[in-house]
Amino acid sequence: MPSSSSSKWTAADLPDLAGRVIVVTGASSGLGTVTARELTRAGAHVVLAVRDVAKGSRVAEGFASGAGSWEVRALDLASLESVRAFAAGWSGPLDILINNAGIMAVPQGKTVDGFELQIGTNHLGHFALTNLLLGNVTDRVVTVSSGAHRIGRVDLEDLNWERRRYRAWPAYGQTKLSNLLFTRELQRRLTEAGSDVRAVAAHPGYASTHLQDHTGSRVQDVLMASLGNRLFAQSDEMGALPTLFAATQDIPGDSFVGPDGFMEQRGHPHLVGRTRVARDADVARGLWELSERLTGVSSGVGAAPRTAV
């Protein structure tokens, strides 16, 4: 069992990832870009799964020459058609799936499938993607959550905010809590099936990313991006460390990795705790079953690997 302390672990401590295939969703900006860049530097073949392929290619072309390689593939997590197309185009082993993409505290909206935009993107899209690819995953699934899971409440009767008055931050908190419940239930199912694949989660603390200036509120964007990022946030390089640690270190399934500093807002990665509801097995199971019904994607645990046709 590893220690919860990382001894100030950094990206320089990444192991040799030669021969490893890793998918990073939302890799065209912020934490996703840093995550993909560092994994490539360490020797992995990284697939940047992004909405804008041209933008993803421009970002990846800026990676310093390293031991690894990269490619860019289209993926819009707010569209189940796009998720299915990405999964259908996959063949061969996938060592690590990093569910990184997300939106934060945006005005009320809907995905093309009619889901509330935040839960549809941050949870349901990744739920479908993971289960469609799970037969190919050989090592682990890493899902990026947030300290904001602490303000979340999962309403299984109204997950898409159709009967409640929509509030952007509680809606975001629900998605981040859902990420942890998804990780917990996925690990339970993997363990029950006798699989060696691990499901783990990470959160970046308060990191300077583009999430803070894309909330849809000019006032909020200014306060968070201009003031919050400048005064309180750590760099995106530091914010990506918990994800990199979770993706490559020997930690138990259902681990949650975050910064080791004050209130987990900044610092180096180590194992952190979560709220009581984030550990609730009944809620986790209920969310999983609801997610299956909403997406039409059943559990991928024990599924046969996708092969080229």
Image (tube, helix red, strand yellow):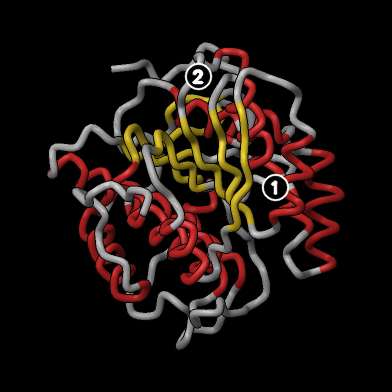
Front position among marks 2 and 1: 2
Using the image, determine if residue 9 lies above or below residue 207.
above
Callout 1 amino acid: Ser
Q: Is residue 182 visible?
A: yes
Residue at numbered disc 2 = 18
In the rendered image, residue 100, in percent from the top left (x then y), is placed at: 55, 47
Q: Earlier in the sequence, mark 2 or mark 1?
A: 2
Which secondary structure lies at badge 1?
loop
Q: Residue at x 50, y 45 (%)?
A: 144
45 or 167, nearer to the observer: 45
Q: In the image, which disc is placed on residue 77?
A: none
Q: Residue at x 60, y 65 (%)?
A: 169
Splitting the image into 4 quarters, where does residue 71 fall?
Answer: top right
Using the image, determine if residue 228 lies above or below residue 44.
below
Callout 2 amino acid: Ala
In the rendered image, residue 250, in percent from the top left (x then y), is placed at: 36, 21
Quadrant containing the N terminus in the rendered view: top left
The answer to whether 44 appears left or right of 183 in the picture is right
80 or 219, nearer to the observer: 80
In the rendered image, residue 134, in percent from the top left (x then y), is placed at: 32, 48
